[in-house]
Image (tube, rainbow, N blue to C red):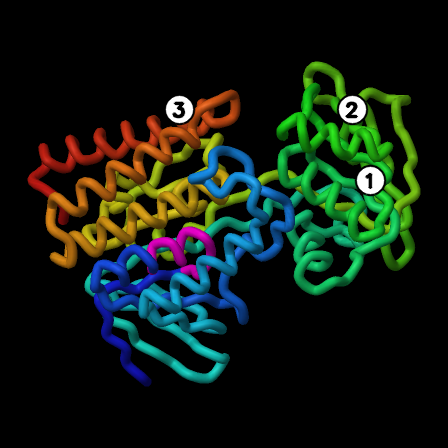
Amino acid sequence: MRKIETDIAIIGAGSAGLCAAIQAAAAGAGVVVFDENQLPGGQLFKQIHKFFGSREHQAGVRGFEIGQQLLEDVKKSGAKVMLDSVVYGLFAENSLGVIAEDKYHYEVKAKKIILAAGAKENYMAFPGSTLPGVMGAGAAQTMINVNRVLPGKRIVMLGSGNVGLIVSYQLLQAGAQVAAVVEAAPTIGGYGVHAGKIRRAGVPILTSHTIKEVYGKEEVEGVVLAQLDEKWQMIPGTEQDIQADTLCLAVGLNPMTELAWMAGCQFTHIPALGGHVPLHDHNMETTKPGIYVAGDITGVEEASSAMEEGKLAGIAAAAALGCLSQEEAAAKKQEVLRRLDMLRTGLFGEKRKAAKEQQMADMAGWQALTAEKGGVK
């Protein structure tokens, strides 16, 4: 078994993990980033659309371009990135178990750990859901934007959140036909600007509809839809048959919290953030001292929020090691918190802000209860 010792170990080389690495390494901390994929950058390299928001939030810049800049900044910072490296365990005294390249076994000792593992796609079960051709929208996005492979010729998208709308448009750009976007709710879930693009391209968005079944002998050949009533029940006689060879599911994301559970972090359940999420304070530190979280593992938001949380975790971890003075750290944190607050405004942002405030309130409640019982064990 090989051994690695470092100041800060970061799990996940996506937008949050890379931003954490840049901040911590720039402050002088020794940083090693682990990621199970063969390329760093996470979801950013699948995002060919331009970001929204203000200039300081990379408005008008495409996701993969942001990813390329982050990779350059990581190289300059001196942080080490280990790819094709699966972190399979988080044990006592901030020890990690890592398998690299399917053959090298590492024991990693870190003074601080930042979990930036991201999120995974939710799935749905229905008749025919296991047929080849049923896939997550994220998988389809990876195929077209990373691997340059068209997942199908005629596609139905289930889910009208930003992921469903954006991937539908990108499928059109890649040469596929999107037969319909199907949404169970009575209104679309994503930004109107994204919905407008695909509507102008002739793609119908069918709200208050769901998938009744998918059929085909050896692969998807068609999709049967049904309309929903106000109680979300299928209305008999409203079935609609659409010929398609692919069904993409854009039905939400779930934080990848396995390592946080293994470490013994305390959790709360907030549906608006994707389900069970680890409690953390304003420094992104969990209920386990020395273990921080950032990005979608803390609750599913936009990539811009993940990057800011990564910066905050990197600053806080470096400051805790004495790499930054209290004054320097406070000023940097305040600037990041200001940008995060900007991102959590507006119709969609306010909902996320309320959910994050609930998460903070739950953390404060846990801290008060722990103090009454004599501190963290």
Tag 2 or tag 3, which sits nearer the N-term?
Answer: 2
Q: Which quadrant holds residue 13?
A: bottom left
- Depth-wise, is mark 3 or mark 1 nearer the camera? 3
Disc 1 residue crowd, few under 14, some 14–19, many 20+, Cα 10 Å: some
Q: Secondary structure at mark 2?
A: loop
Residue 92 visible in the picture? no
Give the residue type that dot 2 points to: Met
Amino acid type for the residue under numbered disc 1: Glu
Residue 265 lies in magenta, yes or no?
no
The answer to whether 135 is drawn above or below residue 9 in the figure is: above
**Which of the numbered marks, if any, corresponds to residue 234?**
2
Q: Which residue is mark 3?
A: 354
Report x, y in % for residue 308: 37, 44
Residue that label 1 marks: 213
Quote the CA–CA distance across marks 3 and 1: 36 Å
Quarter of the image with the N terminus is bottom left
Q: In the rendered structure, which segment of residues is drawn in magenta?
A: 12-21
The residues tagged by marks 3 and 2 sit, at their Cα atoms, a distance apart of 32 Å
- Element under label 3? helix
